[in-house]
Amino acid sequence: MTQLIDIFASIGLWSAVLRIATPLILGTLGALLCERSGVLNLGIEGIMTFGAMIGWLSVYHGADLWTGLLIAAIAGGLFGVLHSFLTVTLGLSQHVSGLGVTLFASSFSYYVFRMVVPVANTPPTIVPFQPLDIPVLSSLPFFGPAFFTQTAPTYLAIIIALLLAYIIFRTPMGLAIRMTGENPHAAEAQGVNPMVIRYGAVIAGSALMGAGGAFLTLAAFDSFFPTMMQGRGWICIALVVFASWRPGRALFGALLFAFFEAFQLRMQTMLGGAVPYQLFLMTPYILSIVALALMARRARVPQALMQPYRRGER
Amino acid sequence: MTLPVLQIEGVSKRFGNNLANDDISLTLAKGEIIALLGENGAGKTTLMSILFGHYTPDAGRIVVDGTELPPGKPRAAIRAGVGMVHQHFSLAPNLTVLENVMTGTESLWAVKSQTGAARRKLLSISERFGLRIDPDKRLGDLSVGEQQRVEILKSLYNDARILILDEPTAVLTNIEAERLFTVLKDMARQGLSLIFISHKLDEVMAAADRIVVLRRGKTVAERRASDSSKAELAELMVGRQVERPVREPSTPGALALAARDITVWVNGVARLKSISFALREGEILGIVGVSGNGQAVLGQMLFGTCARTSGTLELFGKPVADLTVPDVVDAGIGRIPEDRNHEGAIGEMAIWENAVLERISSPAFSKNGLVNRNAGMAFARRIIEEFDVRGGTPQTRARLLSGGNLQKLILGRNLLQNPRILIAAQPTRGLDEGAVAAVHARLLAARKEGAAVLLISEDLDEVIRLADRIQAIVGGLLSPPVEAADADARKLGLMMAGEWREVEDAV
């Protein structure tokens, strides 16, 4: 019991939560933006992998860290163009197209990586983002090191979450996106072009996914390996449902999942000998299924999600 | 005459082999209400979709206030002051009324929505035209009539001066429809110009100043409402004289269906309260009532999709326990459900599949677990031929049939099985004159063959014309039956208002 209290009182747990949460926050917001416009983007797992790879590779070849992050976002956006073309222009099944994008982007990441970086026992590394000192806040006892010694992209992710909440609920653009996700025919009848809105939302959302992936290689770790995404993209897809398509709740959901993850890592070290560690590895996923089951029943799904829009057809 | 606010000049539109609009011209004056009258498929909706920019015409032009509209641009139509209220609403149930109205009205790049100003504008419009609404309610929580109000407000909010309504009363109850026309007339008095599409003669005569009749894509006539008659309009619309079939006398046979003290609770509300009725072979029993008074539940209970809470039900003298759908089908009860698009057919499946679906496990259509496709197709072809289903082959998806033809398909698949009991719920709702006559003829033919027909309807004329006996349903209660010979609209009106005791005293 005292050990448990020790875990909760440890600075390491709380600072890990924010670090683990960052790629999830960005990925979830990206998926959420796509879905609000009515497009499910299962390309997320591959897009995040590609973002992680291309961001890292850019920096490895001399770009600075922010440029690397930007390149990852642009690359994500390009996959967004591909997914939009397949699902919006051609009106193909969003599931199939998304899974196709994931398979393609993942394999392509590995291909590009191997083209440039030869096989080695220890993968090459870069110098990642360093924790940012915020005046006053970072020097607070306990709270300072626990919450305010993060890298800059983490703060950026939180700001983007708040910004996206504002855009979706308080601006005409957000309303147009929501209307497109609920009823593209109505949007069209009101003079909003659903095709343009969907393209825009999917491209912007995919860019967020790319940036989320890049956080892993540019801030959380310092190297890239092809299997590093470990289903984070799928967790994001689940978190969107958990969040009931609201950015604020998406932020909360990502933090909650990250908390489970950080907590189970420490439980592993605490009870490592007595209990097989795989059991702890499972807990965040089990808890997220439970949370999803509880929350998703009240969720309001965008009514036109996964429905291709064709002009003049009802 | 002052300059017309709207001119449609020589508009034509072709879909494949079908010439939907053939050189149509029309003018609309300020403060005028025009009714566009025509059967389903006459090209009314196509014409209005061209006017609103949903379709690009093959020929012709649209002029609003002397300026030609660019074809195929809804946004230009909105800006020119044209508003459209679709039959199937263009609304998002998960958004609020205000959000639905505001979409697309502001620049997409504005950093903040001006919700306060928008709310004030919406409320002032709703005040001015007597269209009361709560702007912050979720749209999906509103009734159909209120949702239509939101559709109209949406157009007015965009400063529409020309309002197009596509079959506005198709989804409304009679009372809601009356209220709507009061509002529309008030709008015309305030200087708006309106066009409404309809195939209902009564409302066209009552609400329009001028009536334009379309048939097979052409304007066949234009009349002032004051100079025309229902009979003339009906003939113009259909292209020949429509004679609704009349009932011949018959002698009812044995008792087919007897319901005693049936009560049904749905979600904690008693929807049917101890109702009793008896249905005999070779007769039509009409159940009239304003929709929402329990007739939907009555239909579902007899279709086997809704269990009764108490009461007894006898089929041909034998009491039955809980009715399931297979029981109903096996007992030879034919069903015409109220919502033909959702309960009556599966839109994405072929006509032949829809024709055989409910009897798919019978030996006629399957063997050893395999569907006998040929038998199904042959059955569908028989329906198409004998029931004059137009617009498709057995392989056509049911969704592509018009309402009247879909109803003929549903009638056909039931009547070709020679049902001993036929339950028809709102069988002619939303159908045009020709299709109504066809459905009526079929119901009367079934009666003649000795079937027991239960006709649930809110159309008084229909019930008086077809039924032998009539009962009214009000708030889940059923009146005692009256003979059709003794019934007239006034008496049935009283019964539908729940005052059947007075009617009985008067008899």
Image (cartoon, rainbow, N blue to C red):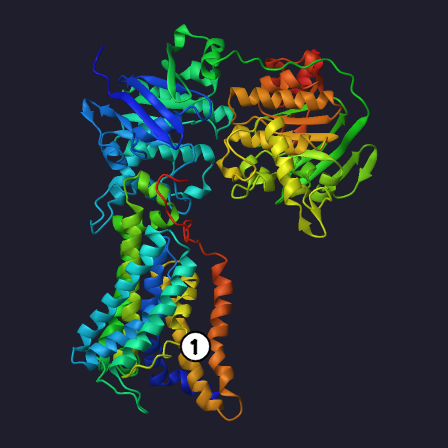
- Where is residue B419 shown, x and y percent of the image? 72, 31
Q: Secondary structure at mark 1?
A: helix
Left or right: residue B153 versus residue B475 is left
Q: Which residue is mark 1?
A: A260
Using the rendered image of the protein, determine whether residue B336 is visible from the camera's viewpoint.
yes
- Where is residue A45 shown, x and y percent of the image? 37, 69
**Which residue does the image show at 49% across and 9% down from the upper left?**
B231
**Which residue does the image show at 34% across and 33% down from the upper left?**
B153
Using the rendered image of the protein, determine whether residue B305 is visible from the camera's viewpoint.
no
Q: Quadrant of residue B5?
A: top left
Q: Residue furthest bottom?
A: A273
- Crowding around mark 1 (Cα neighbors within 10 Å: few <14, some 14 to 19, many 20+) is some
Residue in the foreground of this view, choosing between A163 and A3: A163
Q: Is residue B287 above or below residue B114?
A: above
Left or right: residue A128 versus residue B281 is left
Q: Quadrant of residue A5?
A: bottom left
Q: Is residue B321 above or below residue A126?
A: above
Numbered label tally:
1
Q: Is residue B380 above or below residue A229?
A: above
Residue in the foreground of this view, choosing between A155 and B397: B397
Q: Residue furthest top?
A: B227
**Which residue does the image show at 78% across and 43% down from the upper left?**
B321
Q: Residue furthest right?
A: B317
Chain for disc number 1: A
- Where is residue B491 shown, x and y percent of the image? 63, 15
Residue in the foreground of this view, choosing between A243 and B383: B383
Q: Amino acid at mark 1?
A: Phe
